[in-house]
Amino acid sequence: MWDDAPMTDEERQREKAALAELDKLTAAYRRAEAALDRTRDALHASIVKHLMERNAPPGKVAEHSPYDRNHIRRIADAAGVPPLRTRTVRSAKPTD
């Protein structure tokens, strides 16, 4: 069927049906993917909003989202959310 031999009517119909099924499922996949992207963007915006407003600490935000604390911090850092506490321990750099 994939060589250069001519296709029968039955083979053409089966190919057409297979491609139509793939097109339908691909379109559904793309719609679901777009919905996921929109929902993820809304979730990230909500996480950033609540961290900026100090409505909930990162650990609680993590408990109520699909992400762990580390990922919550990455989202916050990318959005410019300042940490709750300033760093108290600094790495020691040799002085010249």
Image (cartoon, rainbow, N blue to C red):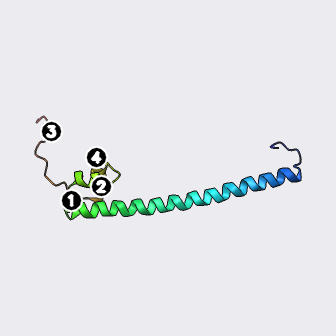
* Percent of width and height locating residue 23: 67, 58
SS under mark 2 = loop
The amino acid type of the residue labelled 3 equals Ser
* Percent of width and height locating residue 24: 65, 59
Q: Earlier in the sequence, mark 4 or mark 2?
A: 2
Query: Which residue does the image show at 37% across and 64% down from the upper left?
Result: 42
- Which residue is disc 2 drawn over? 64
Query: Which residue does the image show at 77% across and 56% down from the upper left?
Result: 16
The amino acid type of the residue labelled 4 equals Asn
The amino acid type of the residue labelled 1 equals Ala
- Which residue is disc 3 drawn over? 91
Q: Is residue 91 above or below residue 35?
A: above
Mark 1 and mark 2: Cα distance apart in space? 10 Å
The reply to whether the C-beta atoms of the residues labelled 3 and 4 are less than 8 Å apart is no
The reply to whether the C-beta atoms of the residues labelled 1 and 2 are less than 8 Å apart is yes
Between 66 and 49, the residue placed more toward the observer is 66
SS under mark 4 = helix
SS under mark 1 = loop
- Which residue is disc 4 drawn over? 70
* Percent of width and height locating residue 88: 10, 45
- Which residue is disc 1 drawn over? 56
Count of labels in the image: 4
The amino acid type of the residue labelled 2 equals His
The reply to whether the C-beta atoms of the residues labelled 4 and 2 are less than 8 Å apart is no
Mark 3 and mark 2: Cα distance apart in space? 33 Å
Q: Residues within 10 Å of mark 4 (few under 14, many from 20)?
A: few
